[in-house]
Image (cartoon, rainbow, N blue to C red):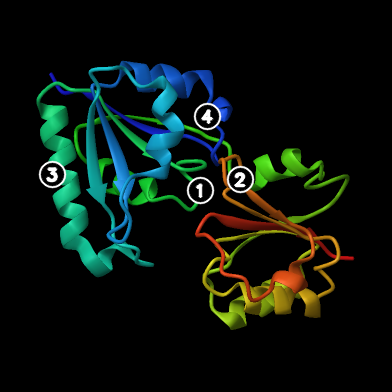
Amino acid sequence: MRGTFYGIGVGPGDPELLTVKAIKAIEAADVLIAPKTEKKDGSVALEIARPYLKKDIEIVYQVFPMVKNFADDAGAWEKNKAEILALLNAGKNVAFLTLGDPMFYSTYIYVFRLLEHEDVDIRTIPGIPAFIAIGSRVGRPIVEGNDVFTVIPGTADRERLEEVMAVAGSAAVMKVYHNSAEIIDLLRRNNMTKEAVLVSRAGLDDEKIIYDLEAHADEKLNYLSTILTRRS
């Protein structure tokens, strides 16, 4: 009998922000899939979930290429899929850990698409996205009344960023690590820096909170960096 596949959102960083359902799924798992990139050792998602791991849990690290379209490197994805299916076919419950929420800009989405057409029992467990946690962390309501909220991927091209920021009222800008100076400049042009806060590695031990974005525009940021802002 095939095992169950769990996609588990572990939130932005603080282990206490995992849901009860997420913890129960981790405890029910025989194997944990810990995603990582080629360039870094270890897995942030795994470290967040570590307080809830069973002593005899099997941990499998899988490398996922940092590409915009997983079809650009289908070989790596198919290899990971085959490994997961082999574990499930052996009757093991497999949990795939992912930062934030599984269905929100996550690696898990690609894994889900690979497995959803297989004969697999998939159970996806939501997690808290970084911008939601940041609002509570810094005491900033994210939307009020009839506010319209926009989520902007910092990895989008400049034309798209300009187009969206021109009409955004309240916004979260995700993944601002590689072009932060450009993003902060666009926010300034759209009167969105005065009310902005940038949080890097929210909920982790080395969390960094920046309110004066323009003074830190040239600072190198961690991959897990998010800006929460509204138009002045």
Q: Are marks 3 and 2 in contact (CB under 8 Å)?
A: no
Image point (57%, 49%), residue name? 201
Between 140 and 221, the residue placed more toward the observer is: 221
Image point (44%, 50%), residue name? 106
Kindly identify which residue carries mark 1: 104
Mark positioned earlier in the residue sequence (3 or 2): 3
Helix, strand or loop at mark 2: loop
Residue 168 position in % (x across, y down): 76, 66
Mark positioned earlier in the residue sequence (2 or 1): 1
Q: Which mark is residue 82?
A: 3
**Which picture quadrant has residue 154?**
bottom right
Kindly identify which residue carries mark 4: 15
Mark 2 is surrounded, within 10 Å at the Cα level, by few (under 14), some (14 to 19) or many (20 or more) other residues, namely many
Mark positioned earlier in the residue sequence (1 or 3): 3
Q: CA distance from mark 3 to mark 4?
A: 30 Å
Q: CA distance from mark 4 to mark 1?
A: 19 Å
Q: Are marks 1 and 3 in contact (CB under 8 Å)?
A: no
Residue 7 position in % (x across, y down): 37, 34
Q: Which mark is residue 146?
A: none
Is residue 61 toward the left or the right of residue 206 in the image?
left
